[in-house]
Image (tube, coloured by chain):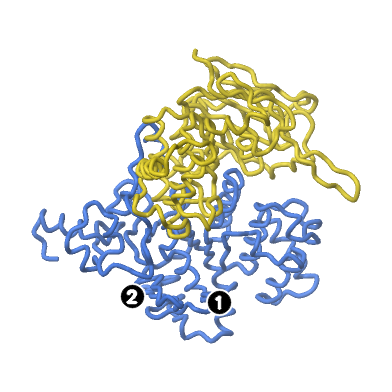
Amino acid sequence: MSEYLLDVQDLHTSFFTDAGEVQAVNGVSFHLDPGEILGIVGESGSGKSVTAYSIMQILADTGRIVGGRILYKGDDLSKFSEKQMQKFRGKSCSIIFQDPMTSLNPVFTIGSQLKEAVVLHTDKRGKEADERVIELLELVGINEPQKRVKQYPFEHSGGMRQRVMIAMALACEPDILIADEPTTALDVTIQAQILELIQELQLKLGMAVILVTHDLGVIASMCDNVVVMYGGRICERGTASEIFYHPKHEYTKGLLRSIPNVNNMKERLVPIAGTPINMLNLPKGCSFCARCDNAMKICLDRVPEELEINENHKASCWMNVKQAFEEGGAAV
Amino acid sequence: MSAPLVEVRNLKQYFPVKTGFFGTKPLKAVDDVSFYVNPGETLGLVGESGCGKTTVGRSLIHLYTPTSGEVYFNGERVEKGNIKQMRRRMQMVFQDPYSSLDPRMTVEDIIGEPLDVHGLYKTKAERRERILSLMETVGLNAEHARRYAHEFSGGQRQRIGIARALAAEPQFIVCDEPVSALDVSIQAQVINMFEELQDKLGVAYLFIAHDLLVVHHISDRIAVMYLGKIVEIADADDVNNNPMHPYTISLLSAVPIPDPDIARSRKRILLEGDVPSPLNMPSGCAFRTRCRYATEQCAQSCPSLTDRGNGHMVACFNR
């Protein structure tokens, strides 16, 4: 078996709350190759962020990985000691968060916060570390880094802070950068700057990127491969063009019909009926069955298995099984 | 052409901001904005955060008292003295469906409040009947009338807010980012509802949002704001297919389009740097610090909106 950079196998993550167990991630598997940009798309509560946090092992106190494995270059992360894990975070894999306003400490200067990351993860000290900080700020396109290192986060705009966060994440050139809704809090023109920066850095440093977002537009312009999540499960995965032009899961199809696009400006949108899923009360079958127009009896009872549509595309929807059966009577 | 329903002339809204111990300085949130909205039409208002688009909406229905400028509704001037009667005809839907509904009121009372304020019923039974029919109009289950706002999801709460705005049978509704707090799959439900209500009731909207695809979809005309000023205003398709102001051009090129082939083939026109502070505005044209076409003239005076044909108004010297 070939080794992937990151291999997530049948991941289950649950939160144990007063109201009961919330199965936020429910059997998610995917892998990441070096230099790949993978998009994870889904709405709030789909489990996309929890998947990212599970990889970094930075879940909230009530959360726990209850099943599955995460392999980094073949090594099982759950076997890592806390010390190894610390090394993994930062050196192998870094994360940037949605809200650049709250992810920086307001009482320390930008420079000292960046230096902390550099000192912690590399053997650069003193002057050498300071130089590295300036270099990192230059890398993410911040003007006058000498002046900026002495400033506090409140003196920076949202876009600048997100650049600082990216600089921090890149401090020791990780193999994987996880970006959790990196531009959701930013304005469109600033969003474009940050996306461009991530793309540029990805090319320059050759790292792999996992981009977690709810914005299909961001996915379309950035990602090689896409994973669509709903209710803690993966609905569909494939290359961006397969997912956007030949969706094979009812949720993806519905999602694409429900957003305004350049081609449907004069038509009425087709919304997905119903309300988002209640994670405390997951259906027995497919997560999406309650909102699906084409739900069949089997959808309510059994979780659909993933079916290969072609080598670049897999989907978990009983409709495909039905279609395959009708077409060729294939034994499924 | 028929007379506009709402006309805004030279609207200015300044907020005093403390600078140091003694002084205050005016923050020009909205600086000399004029536009009109026709009956039954949707005017989209787009711009980035801090450009003053929400303030325009709020000043328009006197949630803030404008510093100067006039608002006319059906030819009648909207003033402090008549705002209560005017608000029967002009209503507002707010961005955040979580904070814009009183948690201690039942849905029935929230939707019924405009009816109470304007005395729009004679008997209790009539009041209830109207509330239930409003709930039905926005797709809420009438059985839920006695429930509280927290028992509803975000999309349903936004429907409550819309039912409340519709209660007084207005001809004009200011919609301030009504879908941005909602999940993608719910947005379309609410957008469709706005469009259906317009077809049915002939109500006009000022639709304020930062999502350009949503605004393009719902609007007949679009106004683009930058730092308190309208820089371009035209038919929705004109703005999108033939943008003229350099800010509009880069704003549109920055919108992520959910189509991989289009998204990858086009070029983003990146703007340098950030929006200047509205407390410390550049002289002349506010956009010149980030503009590729900026010249001497832009620093000296501020361009005003001029017609480039077909009502396509642009405020730029060089385009």
Q: Is residue A303 above or below residue A57?
A: above
Horizontal relation, residue B154 to residue A228: left or right: right
Horizontal relation, residue A195 to residue B185: left or right: right
> Mark 2: few, some, or many residues within 10 Å (few <14, many ≥20)?
few
Q: Nearer the viewer, mark 1 or mark 2?
A: 1
Return the x and y of residue A114 as percentages of the image width and height. Answer: 71, 67
Return the x and y of residue A22 as percentages of the image width and height. Answer: 40, 73
Circle 1 residue: A88
Instruction: Please state the chain letter of the residue tagged with numbered disc 2 in the rendered image.
Output: A
Q: In the figure, what tint was chain B given?
A: yellow
In the image, A155 versus A131, the foreground residue is A155
Q: Earlier in the sequence, mark 1 or mark 2?
A: 2
Which element type, helix, strand or loop, lies under badge 1? helix
Q: In the figure, what tint was chain A given?
A: blue
Horizontal relation, residue B274 to residue B36: left or right: right
Q: Quadrant of residue A257?
A: top left
Q: Are marks 1 and 2 in contact (CB under 8 Å)?
A: no
What is the quadrant of the C terminus of chain B in the image? top right
Amino acid type, label 1 = Phe
Q: Is residue B250 above or below residue B306?
A: below
Q: Residue at x 39, y 35 (%)?
A: B197
Q: Residue at x 60, y 36 (%)?
A: B57
Amino acid type, label 2 = Met
Residue A295 seen by the camera: yes
Dots 1 and 2 on the same chain? yes
Q: Quadrant of residue A51?
A: bottom left
Return the x and y of residue A121 as percentages of the image width and height. Answer: 65, 75
Circle 2 residue: A1
Which element type, helix, strand or loop, lies under badge 2? loop
Q: Is residue B82 above or below residue B214?
A: above
Q: Quadrant of residue A48?
A: bottom left
In the image, A296 versus A96, the foreground residue is A296
